[in-house]
Amino acid sequence: MLGTIGAASVDALFTDVPTDALQSGPIPGLPFHASERAVERHMAALSARALTADQVPFFLGAGAYRHHVPASVDHLIQRGEFLTAYTPYQPEIAQGTLQVLFEFQTQVARLFGCEVANASLYDGSTACWEGIAMAGRITRRRRAILSGGLNPHYAQTCATMARFTGDDLVVLAPRAEAESDDADVIAAIDATVSCVVVQYPDLFGRIPDLAAIAEAAHAAGALLIAVVTEPVALGLLESPGALGADIVVGEGQSIGVGLQFGGPYLGLFATREKFVRQMPGRLCGETVDAEGRRGFVLTLSTREQHIRREKATSNICTNSGLCALAFSIHMTLLGGVGLGRMAQASHARAVTTARRLSAIPGVEVINRVWFNEFAVRLPRPAAEVVDALAERGVLGGVPLSRLCPDRADLGDVLLVATSECTLEDDIAALASALEEVLA
Amino acid sequence: MNDLNPSGWRPSTGSSEPGAWRPTVTGHRALEQDEPLLFEIGSLDGCGVDFDEDDGAEMLDALPRRTTPVALPGLSEPEAVRHYTRLSRQNYAIDLGLFPLGSCTMKHNPRLNEKVARMPGFASVHPLQPQQTVEGALEVIAQLADWLVALTGMASVAMTPKAGAHGELCGLLAIRAALEARGEADARRVILVPESAHGTNPATAAFAGFTVAPIPANPDGRIDLAALLERLGDDVAGVMITNPNTCGLFERDMKTIADAVHAAGGYVYCDGANFNAVVGRVRPGDLGVDAMHINLHKTFSTPHGGGGPGAGPVVLSQALAPFAPLPMVVRDEAGKPRLIEDPAERTDAFGRMCAFHGQMGMFTRALAYILTHGADGLRQVSGDAVLNANYLLASLKDVLDAPFAESGACMHEALFSDAGFAEGFSTLDLAKGLIDEGFHPMTVYFPLVVHGAMLVEPTETESKAALDQFIAAMRDLARRAKDGDPALKAAPVHAPRRRLDETLAARKPRLVWKEA
């Protein structure tokens, strides 16, 4: 090969690199190659240093939920034709990925009660910002109201972007009360507001009245962005789009993707058809080929960075394709009926758990209503309690202080989530460990 | 033309000659099985999930409930497995053959990495578990961070960005934050971006609140140094440079540019999409780079998954390191990883890029890849990648116009143009011809600085035999494009679909399935 090239050595191909920046050998101080077995052992040893959701009673949520994922999902996404394909830029040999995306978009649109959905974004938090940015483009206003029930990490992600784009975000403070802050959100709406951002169910697991908020927003010419961090909830609750939300964003992790210590996850994005040209991210559309047969292509790319460059609706390129596939397969296995069953089981476990915990002296369930996650007030700082529970082999929930470290007044609040994976024994173990810790 | 059969897969060519194609009852042809949409085969009461027996589901009366299930069809497990397996067979993939997409680094995805990513200590842990219950996961992040810092010669790394473009955003926001700290954020609003840059660069600069000033390329395919130096000034926040660049060339003047940008008060962002060309040989920190994202789904072999997920950690210089976003994993004095999430602990941090800690599933895969290769193996990766690309360039430049063949050795990708093609024949025709030859086409019409650009990146994981087969196909296609072979205009004819009508798709968007 070097003879064909006319080079004396591989190193001679790097002569354009300034010699003082070119390493003459392997970078010093780093280990050399290792065998497959050695690497597997190294990683397995690290993996063992964990308390995992499958090992112990597990009650964490706050934006990432554990649900059972059928074995066929992980098997199918590991087919090399899906796993090792690129973004479907050559549609004639990417109809597999493209048809999956078309089906995914349809599933997401129906789940959210919207007319159209995109082919995915990175995760729920970044999708949330993309929604705010889109609402700004549509309304030509730069002020957004974020409900206090929005996951603070989502709010921080959006605030980080707004700080640099110059958008004005009004972030309402989270309040640990029985009812969601719908009235505060509605009171904050005026004719300068581009959108209101409301999580559904919210951070504390409460169910905001989206229809009322949508009505108030629309009356002021603003859009309602609903944020769904637990899409399984829509197996029981009405879809946000049907309640008047103009943009629905979400985290798709809880269907098909798994916990994975926070990533990769799956940003969901759906909206009204009339806004489609303002949408961020890739879109797959139906068309025909030269013989008139149905086929699918990436479309409306004049919104995107590779065509529009600095005028694009978003800078996103690579998205969460394989996670969208996992979501879509799991959703296909569930169907609407199965989703309802999974939602019902998740909710039922939460009802049982709340009843058991509220019987413990000093523990107060804050919510009036919840889906599969609720907040409790403890007689001690929740972070300490969670650590003590972990020592007893129970992953007992998310202390709110983890999400809002600056809110000392919320230090005693614990978020507790359940799913169809939560066993009666798990609930009993949490209750008895909590009793012991609080005794 | 013959009528379509009911499934639309192949025209039913009617001939009873022995050995000729025959219409089939199903429309399938042996292993070529068309697959209807999920919505056409599933029923709204179907379900393929095996639930536990209900134990008297208790419900809150006050819960506002939907009246009907979501209208989503369900398939049984065997139906679903067939649906997706059949669909998968309509995809090209690295597992099937050479995938020479320039700037995308479609190398083999080692399967050890898949196994490792599914280990329970990484896959079955929640991002908000107490830190003492996720020590292994934090150690993976810390070890990968250590490697990325060492391989790039930078001060630190922000691990949370979720893909390359998200990493670009992270780097530019760090630059904005550094300028704010200097009180110059309002004065310095301009980012210089070479014309040959990937579209995400200008899009990111705009998304981060900057304005973009394009910098031309010189005739040898590199940045016009004089034009760049000319444009530097008090309004410039920094530059975004891809190195090696999208013409497949190393920017020889990188250090000179970096020094000049620094002297003018700006910062240097490097798009690390092409890091595979120099990994283990060149540390960007030695070239004066202040921030660079690393596509773990390119250089470090995490699978592209048909469009993601990726991961785009951003290495940062001493000047930008304090502004890195949260959360971040740091090592304490004893070397133990610790997660910092509270902004009060890092007051200079510019904020947060996403809800959790980044793409853990990509971190485990990338770390397994790096440990497998080591410092010596990674050096060989870049060497082999550049060797393969130069072999392609040398083997094709007599039949295809290679505008920068005299600009020095290419790096890990070779760039060709459509010069010399017959009237009416384009890069697209050659690309579609490659499909019929059983290859995925190269990157086409990018970079924009070359007419009918074809950017070919073979990667280091292709053997000489695979390259030779690709070269033979390319030579034949180049000849046909130059001769104006009309059959090439019809390509592909052997793919699951012929050329698709993209204009129709955009004019009348049908983005979701609707009942006819």
Image: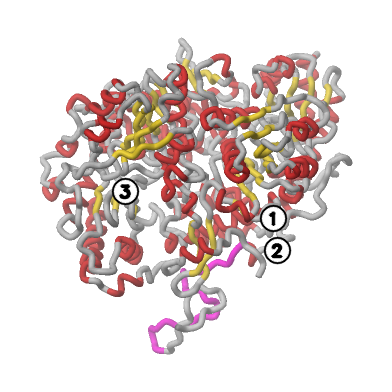
Look at 64% across and 50% down and name the residue there.
A271
Picture disc at residue B43: 2
Res B467 quadrant in image: bottom left
- Residue type pointed to by label 3: Pro
For mark 3, does the 10 Å Cα neighbourhood hold few (<14), some (14 to 19), or many (20 or more) residues?
many
Which quadrant of the structure image shows residue A333?
bottom right
Q: How crowded is the residue under tag 2: few (<14 C-alpha within 10 Å), some, or many (20+)?
A: some
Which residue appears at 27% of the width and 41% of the height?
A: B216
Report x, y in % for residue B118: 52, 38
Q: Residue furthest top?
A: B333
Residue carrying label 1: A335
In contact (CB < 8 Å): disc 2 and disc 1: yes
Nearest the viewer among A358 and A38 is A358
> How far is disc 2 from disc 1 in space, using C-alphas?
8 Å
Query: Which residue in the protein does label 3 denote?
Result: B447
Left/right placement of residue B155 relative to residue A11 reads right
Specify whether residue B438 is in view. yes
Q: Which residue sits at x=19%, y=36%?
A: A14
